[in-house]
Image: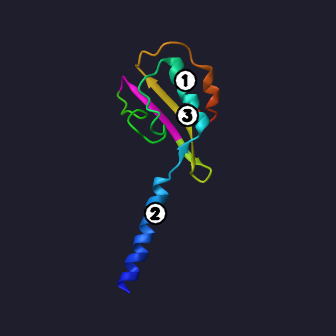
Amino acid sequence: MLFLRLVLGSIFIVCCLTTLTNGATLAKDEVEALKRIGKTLGKNGWNFGSDPCSQHDSWVDQSTRYYANNVTCDCSFNSSTICHVVRIVLKAQNLSGTLPPNLNSLPFLQEM
């Protein structure tokens, strides 16, 4: 009986961990939009090897009063399987140029 409980408990834990690791990711078209926006602005340091909504250091930096590098996502779409960029804050990074027209490729963007 104890063995059966351990097996069922192990299966339950594996299922829970699998669900957590298969979390929501940013929509592919929005990843491409971020790549184009970064290139247009001359933004270096975004690591596209990790999902922009993953809270990886290249996407979310602990902001100070004078510096910010944050991409914020809302991952509540499509039963929490899809994320959308809702906020981009790039402060004190000496970025040049104008706001890129690719911003319209981020339809859920609320703040820049």
Give the farthest residue toward the bottom: 1
Nearest the camera: 54 or 61?
Answer: 54
Question: In the image, what residue occupies the spot 44% across and 29% down?
Answer: 46
Q: Quadrant of the N terminus?
A: bottom left
Number of dots carrying numbers: 3
Residue carrying label 1: 37
**Comes first in the chain, label 3 or label 1:** 3
Q: Is residue 84 above or below residue 4?
A: above
Q: Quadrant of residue 100?
A: top right
Classed neighbour count for the residue bearing mark 1: other residues with Cα under 10 Å, few (<14), some (14–19), many (≥20): some
Give the amino acid type for the residue marked by disc 3 in the picture: Val
Q: Is 67 in front, or is 51?
A: 51
Asked if residue 46 is among those painted magenta in the image, a careful observer would answer no
Residue 112 can be seen in this image: no
Q: Is residue 46 above or below residue 17?
A: above
Q: CA distance from mark 2 to mark 1?
A: 36 Å
Q: Residue 31, which numbered label? A: 3
Whole-percent x, y for residue 83 in the image: 56, 43
What residue did someone put label 2 on? Answer: 16
